[in-house]
Structure formats: C-alpha cells, structure tokens
Amino acid sequence: MDELLTIPEWRDAARARVEKAAWDYFRSGADQERTLRANRRAYRAWTIWPRVLVDVSAPSAATTVLGTEVATPILVAPTAYHRLAHPDGELATAAGVADAGSLYVVSTLATVALEEVAAASAGPKWFQLYVHRDRGLTRALVERAEAAGYRAIVLTVDTPRLGRRLADERNRFTLPAGLTMANLAADVVGLTGSGLAAYFADRHDASLGWRDVEWLRSITRLPLAVKGVVRADDSARAVEAGAAAIIVSNHGGRQLDGAPATLEALPRVVDAVAGRAEVLLDGGIRWGTDALKAIALGARAVLVGRPILWGLAVGGRAGVARVLALLTAELTRAMALSGCPRLDAIDRTLVEPAAPRP
C-alpha cells in the first residue's frame, strides 16, 4: 500500500482483486455513462487562484457536520455490498473510517446488519434509507438505526426506480451464495438481467413524495439529510420539509444519464438553501483539490464512494483508512498552497471558471 500514491493507483490495484461482475457493479454508470464522466470533468472546469503571504504553518481540515466533530471534511458515501470487495465488508469499512477520524454513511443495502456495523467502531455514522412500499419495514429500519446509535437518517430520493446499468444487465448481476442484504433479509436474485433492478422494481416505492419526507421527519428524533438533489427548487422545498442537510448527488452517475454533474449543480443549491441547512456533495472526487473546489463552491463536506471500495478491496480496514488519509493530506496541502489555513477560509473567491481552451 505504501506504493499507492494516488486514488487512481488504488483503483488500478483494486481491479486485480475484485471479481469481474462485482467490479463492473462498483464501477459502472447508467446507459452511456455521460453523467459518470461529467462528474469528473466538472472539476477541471474550475481554476484555483491561490492567496499568498498567509500563515499556513498549521493548516487544519477539522470541521463539524450536523454538530458532529470530524477530523476531515471527506466523508464516506453510502455504497452497497462491501463484502463483494472484502470478506469483512462494512465492518472493516466502519473501523477504517473511524481510524481516519471521518464519518460513515451506512447503506440500507449493506451485507452486514446495521447493528453490527454500528458496533464495529466508535466513529460517527449516519444511516442511508430507501423508502419501501412496506412503510412498516421503513419505520422499523429508522427505529433500528436510532436504537443502534446512528446520528442522522439520509433519505435517498433519486431512485424511484433503478437506472439501467448495462454491465449489470449483461452480467445478470446477483449476490453470490452466502451474501445477503443483511438489513432486509432478502436476496438479490434475477431471472433475467440485473437482480438488483428486479429487487428495486418489486420493493421500492416509486410514488415517494414530499408528504413522505414530512412523515419520515415526524417518526424520528434524528436529523434528516436528503440525498440525490440537484435542483435549486427541490433543495429549498427539502429544507421546508424539515431537512437539516442536502446532499447534492446524482448517485455516482448511476441513475439518470444526462443529469448534471454534481459540482455544476452545487452553487445553485447552496444559494437556494441560503444557510438554512448544511449542503454536502458527492460524485467524482478523486483528488484533494477536488474537495477544495467543492468546499469553495459552498459544500460543508464531501463524500466519496468508489475510492473507499478500492481501499477496502486492497487493504481492508487499513486500506479504507489510507484512502481517507491520502485525500485529506492532499486537501490539507492544497489548503496550505492556496493560502487557506482552515476550512472557513475557503470561499468562492478562491476559484473561478477555467479559461476556455483555444
């Protein structure tokens, strides 16, 4: 692991360790993967204009998210099926995230029960929720998360049905024998195409609406984050419905192909929220400078998904911690080189749209 100096190098090392169908599941985006590529390309559209003669002898990336102290603004996004990447799955992820001083958003579709993940480390955790047609099951998941010590509920709202991921269709993706969606006591088995797509079509509620957001807010004492928002008007309405945080996300380019890159959507969401809730972002972050640009455009913190799976595949708990430490070190170095000793010194004046290429 000492030789892996960049996140792309971790990706390449992980590819050799993960079975093909699992790799395709983790890597792929929807349809032509235009949004998947746009998430990365968006960071190249901004230039950092560094300040000089600032005391940056002790730069700090520490912050808070929804009142929880973290050592880094680089958090861990919810991703499914970690035992496809490593036998310890979400248990290793939780421990590695805690080692790095970060925060882990645990997926409903974990391969380890949410109570076991909660007990795997003392680090802070949020629980990501899909609303099922069975509202009793949905309520039970929220109650279990609250009882297990999760600090927030993250409602994913960009998945009324699953985007078409061609690799999964061709691979007829399903969980191998011995792995289950541990929170749901359900197997992913598809007779044709993707088993995950079949599961979503059967169980998830495509009628989810704003009243459901208000209902969810009413059944828990935990703060609610709404994930999967790219529009300004939806962001404002989510705040009015009781959201304490908005996570600007396009599901890693895995849902609507042709949706905007998250960094492109971020400034208008920040303006619409107008300080009434915290704004976070995921999608395409592979370098510390990516995180710097997102924070400059108004994100309080960012979340990474695929890089965590790569770290998990290569080194288990230690790999997860190393990936987060690498990104945090890159961010801290970029802060020092751009004249920002603390995160609150990063603002929109630090970045400008890149000049068009001739």
Image (cartoon, helix red, strand yellow):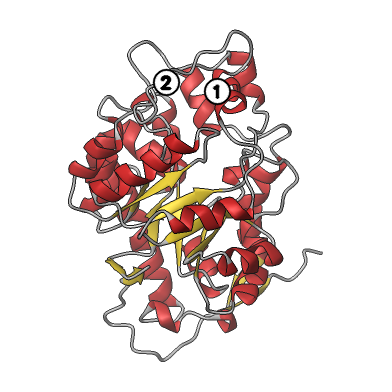
CB-based contact (under 8 Å), mark 1 and mark 2: yes
Residue drawn where x is 63% and y is 69% of the image: 236
Residue 132, position in %: x, y? Answer: 52, 35
Per the image, the residue denoted by label 2 is 186
Tell me where residue 163 appears, x and y as whole percent: 66, 33
Q: Residue furthest right?
A: 358
Residue 37 percent coordinates (x, y): 66, 44
Work out whether residue 117 can be spotted.
yes
Q: How many neighbours does mark 1 have within 10 angstroms: few (below 14), some (14-19), or many (20 or more)?
A: some
Front-lying residue, 319 or 241: 241
Q: Is residue 357 left or right of residue 169?
A: right
- Can residue 2 be spotted in the picture? no
Placement of 10 over or under 17, stated as above or below? below
Mark drawn on residue 37: none
For residue 30, which quarter of the picture? top right
User: Who's the residue at 50% across and 50% down the image?
Assistant: 155
Residue most toward the top?
Answer: 191
Q: Is residue 37 shown above or below 22? A: below
Q: Is residue 145 above or below residue 13?
A: below
Element assignment for label 1: helix
Residue 157 screen position, x and y as percent: 59, 48
Splitting the image into 4 quarters, where does residue 327 fall?
bottom left
Task: Find residue 199 and name its label.
Answer: 1
Q: CA distance from mark 1 to mark 2?
A: 9 Å
- Which quadrant: the C terminus? bottom right
What type is the residue that disc 1 sits on? Tyr
In the rendered structure, the answer to whether residue 218 lies left or right of residue 263 reads left
